[in-house]
Image (tube, coloured by chain):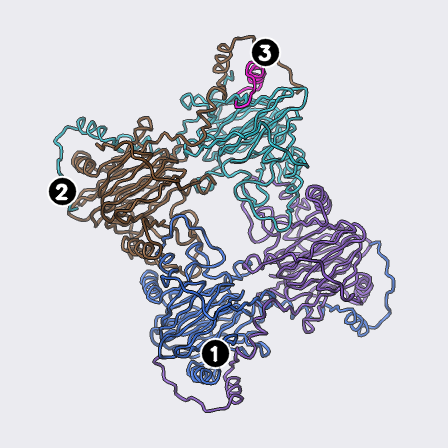
Chain colours: A cyan, B purple, C blue, D brown
Amino acid sequence: MATRTPDTLEVSYDEFCGALAAKDLQPLWTQAAKLMPPQPIPRTLPWLWRWQSVLPLAQRAGELITIERGGERRVLALANPGLNGLPYTSSTLWGAYQYLGAHESAPAHRHTPSALRFVVDGSGVWTTVDGDACDMSAGDLVLTPSWTWHDHSNPTDAPMVWFDGLDLPLAATLESVFFEPHPDLAQNVPQPHNASTRVHGGRALRPLGERANARHSPLLVYRYRDTDSALRELLDARGGPIASLEFVNPSTGGPALPTLGCEMHRLVPGRRTHPKRKVGSSAYVVFSGTGHTIINGERFDWERGDCFVTPSWSAVEHQAAEPADLFAVSDRPVLEALHLFREETLDRPQDVTRTFAPK
Amino acid sequence: MATRTPDTLEVSYDEFCGALAAKDLQPLWTQAAKLMPPQPIPRTLPWLWRWQSVLPLAQRAGELITIERGGERRVLALANPGLNGLPYTSSTLWGAYQYLGAHESAPAHRHTPSALRFVVDGSGVWTTVDGDACDMSAGDLVLTPSWTWHDHSNPTDAPMVWFDGLDLPLAATLESVFFEPHPDLAQNVPQPHNASTRVHGGRALRPLGERANARHSPLLVYRYRDTDSALRELLDARGGPIASLEFVNPSTGGPALPTLGCEMHRLVPGRRTHPKRKVGSSAYVVFSGTGHTIINGERFDWERGDCFVTPSWSAVEHQAAEPADLFAVSDRPVLEALHLFREETLDRPQDVTRTFAPK
Amino acid sequence: MATRTPDTLEVSYDEFCGALAAKDLQPLWTQAAKLMPPQPIPRTLPWLWRWQSVLPLAQRAGELITIERGGERRVLALANPGLNGLPYTSSTLWGAYQYLGAHESAPAHRHTPSALRFVVDGSGVWTTVDGDACDMSAGDLVLTPSWTWHDHSNPTDAPMVWFDGLDLPLAATLESVFFEPHPDLAQNVPQPHNASTRVHGGRALRPLGERANARHSPLLVYRYRDTDSALRELLDARGGPIASLEFVNPSTGGPALPTLGCEMHRLVPGRRTHPKRKVGSSAYVVFSGTGHTIINGERFDWERGDCFVTPSWSAVEHQAAEPADLFAVSDRPVLEALHLFREETLDRPQDVTRTFAPK
Amino acid sequence: MATRTPDTLEVSYDEFCGALAAKDLQPLWTQAAKLMPPQPIPRTLPWLWRWQSVLPLAQRAGELITIERGGERRVLALANPGLNGLPYTSSTLWGAYQYLGAHESAPAHRHTPSALRFVVDGSGVWTTVDGDACDMSAGDLVLTPSWTWHDHSNPTDAPMVWFDGLDLPLAATLESVFFEPHPDLAQNVPQPHNASTRVHGGRALRPLGERANARHSPLLVYRYRDTDSALRELLDARGGPIASLEFVNPSTGGPALPTLGCEMHRLVPGRRTHPKRKVGSSAYVVFSGTGHTIINGERFDWERGDCFVTPSWSAVEHQAAEPADLFAVSDRPVLEALHLFREETLDRPQDVTRTFAPK
């Protein structure tokens, strides 16, 4: 190398490190093992939030925080203690419970983070997505894809609480978050309602000549009755201990949203699933049943409405005590798109060494 | 050009043409207008075959032609008079009616041409595709994709006739036809039946981790009850005069078969569809209802079970007299894959200048 | 099946076949073996056209046939004797030699069939494609993709003859041929010339932000000097007896044209290639060298400028007597897009049973 | 909603927030504006590192830190001051200078983060990637894609310093980092060297029958002579003030690596580029020339070897004082794959309000 060394320093090693810092440089060799570990060392911790703890707080939020134009949703974020106080459920996922009181509306807006709503309980709320009013009932999955206008309204006499899943932590890392309030409180809703399910809800059928929409699924609502029957058929055909379905974009066969994997898992009671681990984190919402999940040797007992998170490359086994359906949101489509996904089945079941004490 | 001319001939123009022929050469300039017309000049003729004519002949074939090992199907091909005596329905499509007697079976085989079966009437026959036994009922579409083993068996006391659609003319042009009889008369059928509909029949749902199958749809049967409800929803959402659905490969969102477009069209009685033309031919099978179709100014009256063909770039309008569902098979996926598809809506309805007299 | 049989005929088998014909029906069972053979039975025959025979006829055409506005190109089509007098080289490919006299121009037009020009000898002609003037020299490949305007002009003092490859037979079967003359004799040519090679001719480099063009390659000319050096490198890296390259669309990595595979093969003298067969036909143009090719046991000797065709599923082996480059056009992209492609290497070399006597 | 409220709390708002924290919940409404800003608020700061500052420190590292089996590379990471002490150049990119002494080798390993090497100066070092030995010279780009074995060796008498670009910050957020040392210090290197450039280095040419590799480019080295000539041609064809090329995967036409965009930009001296902003960050390495870049109104003067970073959605304009080539690495392929990319040209040039003082 022909370049000369204008001012090579004569310094001790400590002085050298100081000299690096002064120039906004850091040595790799002192932190290589931490930066490049043999396998992922997630900051995300395995964790669980109890529906019985969240629900009264959500209701309390409904009393204390009023919704007004320009205000925000009454949303309680599930904050993973491993993430330094950030309101994130994992390093890539935002999970939260949102509360909407009787006869209330949450004003319309749009943002680049993609979102999904999964209804744990209740019915009667409408989510309007780019002018398509979608009704929401228990077990339904509703998408509000990136940069689509959306608002929620509750014309019923009862409040409703649902689960929100977003890719916000990833979008923040990618420095890609845009937000815009709608000029009106609520979108104009042309008839008919639920247009996406009418036009794109066929079973392996699409309107002739319709183009693929790779940005997101043109189907915005996935009904629980369809999920339920598909799980039953899959379990019949392939047997247990688990039937796992992914919600897909019918125009491409790919994931419903490019950044969020949406899944439903049905567990056969009394049977333990094979221990597996995969790259990427998942947040599970218990839609029905009771049981427990073992994550890296720690037992997490769950019941309806609870949410728990599995970090990347953690060993995971599920076992239901009674028939159970688990909804899950994951970052799997991101890892697959970037060719970083891998998964494996472990040789033998985990030993349970401790039990998580939920708050 | 440095090349020398070793033996330039002194000949008249006629002698010159003879000299070309002697060397297996043909001049372009004498036939350019025919080879490269301003728009397609199809050899395929608009045509119609009557169910009431085909059915007794199919039944007669059932009496005269016995099925034995190594024998062939009792299939009556719809031979378009424009195609020089070839047993093809259009230049790319094979359409036929197949007859299977009570308690008969058609032996297992496979071939590279893709095939579909559309059931006009009846039920109870099983088509087994690569070991998956699929039952067939009126309005169902059953796929036997390229190079999949398939056999048909009729355990009932009544014969059944259904429509066969194949890409055989195209496969012949592409010199790509392979055929192989199965070592056994019938395939072994592991339980459970209808596995494809159980595993891949979810509504925008797929088994988690399942890869896309670009060769053909993993779903082998499309049930009429699903088609019917999707047509009804689509008509509700978008209005008439026609609702048109394409059967898709749920793992890719693309066509169910790479060479055959499968469609169902529902007509609102009393309303005439907009006149359209498209590149590529279609064979329509009337599943229900009565009505007529105008093709290049010629009127084709149809009723249940009839089949008619529309050639490439022909002007087409449909009008039902009573609620009607038309199944169609086309070469559209081929034209789209090769970037040769185009379509347009004409400015005004066609004048009817003649009426087709079916045989 | 509930349907009744209104008029079942009492006829002998012969009468029955007549009854079918009267209704435009044909039985499958009498012709199944021909329609569905165990492996392809091509109509295309292995054949060879000699440059030394074609060239004087092309020059003669240049004297006899004048080019005028609205007239046609002086093109001599290589008519395969297996195709019933059609001016096609194989069932899917049109191969021809085109002659353009000194200071002549062929008027601008466009058509849906895709075309390529391969220059066997000479230089100095310009082909203008959608306003981009491309110069042509020996060994260059020039594309005139589907529905692009193109004209040819020869500003030099010498005539030039080049090879034309088109997908016209396939486009005809697909009833998809559109043709349009340009309003002017020649296109307007904005500067600079050879824009496609300047913008899209980088080596694994593309203008930032440029979108993929799946319809056809944005690169319109492939220079022989690039082909030559890539063949040399490939042969160095992988050894002989043959190095085979495909010309690709740099924006997708796929074939340069969706319906025509463009290939160059370099043969190491004295070595025989492994016997192979593949679905689909190819037309080979000898760019340099001498040698022979064995097709289904028949020997075809060739020298510079000759063209020979290999039918689908024919066994093919090449052997050069001196260093040889063979340009080839094939229908392989069509077969691959439709999932009908297959190929295999045969266990042992073919016995040569006869030698083709070219005209 | 039928669910009852078992233990609704009577608390003040402050007590309520405490109650949330006790259950690992966080309110959205207090931080919504920060989490969902109107447009990205990057943590990444615009910054610049001077080659003249880095180089002596790299050389000093070469003296102080010896390379041994199991040890780490002598790499100086460019640590962006906005990222809380992390050794990252932006929120998604790792940029660094790596030093390899005369006659030294860096041991073989592999990791899931993708990496690229861009040679600012010198020549003679070999990087071996999955057994393919690639030589490196000034201006060359060398890829070590995700999970490929790689080692570096310097058989020359002079040390060499090059720029490393990795997606490590993104891979860390995705909790997807795996690392594995090679069982041997160096990989076995079968002949011939530079196989990837021989086999995959053709200009829009690929070995016939080769499949697309979507995981990463099969071409591992991009030579500066090719980049240089493509930039010159592009500038000729389209004019200034800037010519921008992306290095692509020739088998797909997509980005060379799925997570890292690799670009080269040539600036015409004396002309200011249009002010633009885009989602996602870039690290620029000055390969040649001098000039300055205005980022959000701040002026960054640069010369050969310097590296500067542009945060997401920052306004960016470049102006060269003498002919300049800027290599850039970005996260653009990630944003495009996830449908989060957007860019815009600003209406008018930025006012320069301050000048960055490099260290």
Evaluate whether residue A204 shows in this view. yes
Label 1 marks which chain's residue? C
The C terminus of chain B is located in which quarter?
bottom right
Question: Measured from the top left, where is residue B27 in percent x and y?
Answer: 52, 80
Question: Measured from the top left, where is residue B332 in percent x and y?
Answer: 61, 57
Image disc number at residue A4: 2
Query: What residue do we see at 76% from left, 49% from top?
Result: B268
* In this view, B4 is above or below A20: below
Evaluate whether residue D191 shows in this view. no
Label 2 crowd bin: few (<14), some (14–19), many (20+), radius 10 Å: few
Label 1 crowd bin: few (<14), some (14–19), many (20+), radius 10 Å: some
Question: Is B169 left, or right, of B21 in this rendering?
Answer: right
**Residue A54 falls inside the magenta stretch:** yes
| Residue ID for mark 1 | C67
| Three-letter residue code for mark 3 | Thr
| Three-letter residue code for mark 1 | Ile
Question: Is D166 left, or right, of C318 in this rendering?
Answer: left
Q: Which of B324/B268 is in front?
A: B268
Residue range corresponding to the magenta coloring: A49-70
| Residue ID for mark 3 | D8
Label 3 crowd bin: few (<14), some (14–19), many (20+), radius 10 Å: some
The N terminus of chain B is located in which quarter?
bottom left
The residue tagged with tag 2: helix, strand or loop? loop
